[in-house]
Amino acid sequence: MKIRHIISMGIFLVLFTIPVNVFAVDFEITDVQIDVYLKEDGQAEVIEQHRYDFDSKFKGITREVFPKRDSSIVHFEAYENDRSLIVEKEESLYKIYRSGKNETIDFNLHYTIVDAVEKYEDGTQFYWTFFSERNESDYGDMTIVVHPPKKASEVDYLGYGAAYKTGALKEDGSVVFSFGAVEAGVGGDVRVVYESSLFPELLAMGDQIRHELTEDLQAIQEEEAAYLKTKIEMGTVGKFTIPGVLLALASVFSYMFRKRHTTKSLAQPLKDAQFVPTEKLSIPATIQYTMPFSQGPEMISASLLDLIRQGYVKQVTETSFELIDVTGTKDHEAALIDLLFRKVGDGTHFSFDDLNAYTKDKKNHQSYGKGLMNWRNGIIQESKDAELYDKKPGLRWLIGFVSVALIPIIIQFGRYELYAFMTILIVLAVIGLVTAIIYSPKNAKGFAIKEEWDELRDRMKNVRVDEWGNLPVDDKYRAYIYGIGVKDARLRDMYEQFERAESRTASQRDTHHMVYNPVFATQSFHTANTNASVSTDGSSSSGSTGAGGGGVGGRGGGSGAF
């Protein structure tokens, strides 16, 4: 396996693992302003302003508001400017109807939180989560302002999660939490404590509360310090781990290179000097072995021609064929005969018209796909049975184990926001895993076969017409079939000369004087594969919110569109 192939597969798998979400509505929530007006009776009037920028059709937006225990949400209303909008409630989900397409709209949401605050001897707190980890939409710029009933002088406040270090106190006692951009899946709680005299209508429900903010702040700071300390330590780990993994992979690839060089030397005495290599594998198996990704319609076309070459099938017209004999067929040859002549054809005859009609019928798609799978598996099995690979299980297990062992380190890099280290290690781990899975170097015998057919393709660059004409008919056929299967234009260019040469059997030569047309056959199989849906070769969100944990101050919520 060449190193560039390994790297290409690694990059492909990295891209393949990136999740792709398909959303019904394309939108962004660019600005959110939430104003909370606390009342003396303990209720809170909330006004939310959400600016949506839609890039598709939409029917409306959603807002999920989960009240915390012993609180409730009432009088939920929605407006666009001064126009009232229809609101439907499904438990804690509110659907606001306002349809349109490719517009920017400001939605104003009004509601009341009943029992929004808790009164203690040393203060009364408002502790709430307006969005939580359950939220599935990004917010471009969010601001939450908590307003006291009157001017306040004894104010303590603290933000949790995304709200940490975002708060600022104004002269009238209002607290402004300026979040900025907030990603989906991130929670943020706001907590403000005012003097209890601002809420005379409430009864105190406990002793002290302000000390909890001090203790929480201290705990957050200690956690933050521990986080930073561990982040520095993980950075040190990364500085040693990544060079170590790079050195290990370099050693592995160096070994692979040396092994390939040694195998190449051992293969030289095993190669024959024939213009067209002697047949050590069937032509379809040779194509699959030397060009592993040649599994498309060209390969089927080449395999059918190989059946003609061996006398199992006779070409009757340019588009029709007759089954002559099945004695001695290999498994993949028997599978292709079964598919083309017994399933598609009438048991003895097969035509491309039959193939087109068969694959147009949806009820035959599964049977056709299964038949192709049996044929392909048979070809691969022939290569495996020939024992042309040095599987190196010990080395592969070691590489795989080391690559898997990197996963916990990768997770830690992500946890501590060391994204450069994380990305590099992911790529290295994927390269290692791909190497462990697919590394199966050719042994000397297999290498000799690969080089013989590679050299044939090089010879065809400068082959003379008379040199080609002097080759035995069977050699011409095998070279020609190989060229069809690997999509080699130089070999396919010999079609006109080959058409004027001898046919496979005397009867064909005397009566029809025709040669298999690979272009037409390949196109027929391509059409059939397309008909049967068979492989020819081997920032926004919609809806409101899903399941997830709520915040500390309330049960959270989120935003969306539909």
Image (cartoon, grey):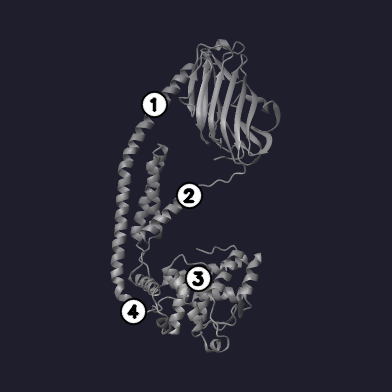
Q: Amino acid at mark 3?
A: Met
Query: Label 2: which residue?
Result: 17
* Alpha carbons under labels 4 and 2: distance apart: 47 Å
Left or right, 86 with reference to 330: right
Which of the marked residues, 3 or 2, is nearer the chain's N terminus? Answer: 2
Query: Label 3: which residue?
Result: 299
**Circle 1: element type:** helix
Which of the marked residues, 4 or 3, is nearer the chain's N terminus? Answer: 4
Left or right, 552 with reference to 353: left
Specify the quadrant of the image occupied by residue 76. Answer: top right
* Alpha carbons under labels 4 and 3: distance apart: 26 Å
Query: Label 4: which residue?
Result: 273
Query: Label 1: which residue?
Result: 222
**Circle 2: element type:** loop
* Alpha carbons under labels 2 and 1: distance apart: 36 Å
Above or below, 197 relative to 22: above
Which of the marked residues, 1 or 3, is nearer the chain's N terminus? Answer: 1
Do the numbered discs 3 and 2 sit on residues whose CB atoms are within 8 Å?
no
Q: Amino acid at mark 4?
A: Ala
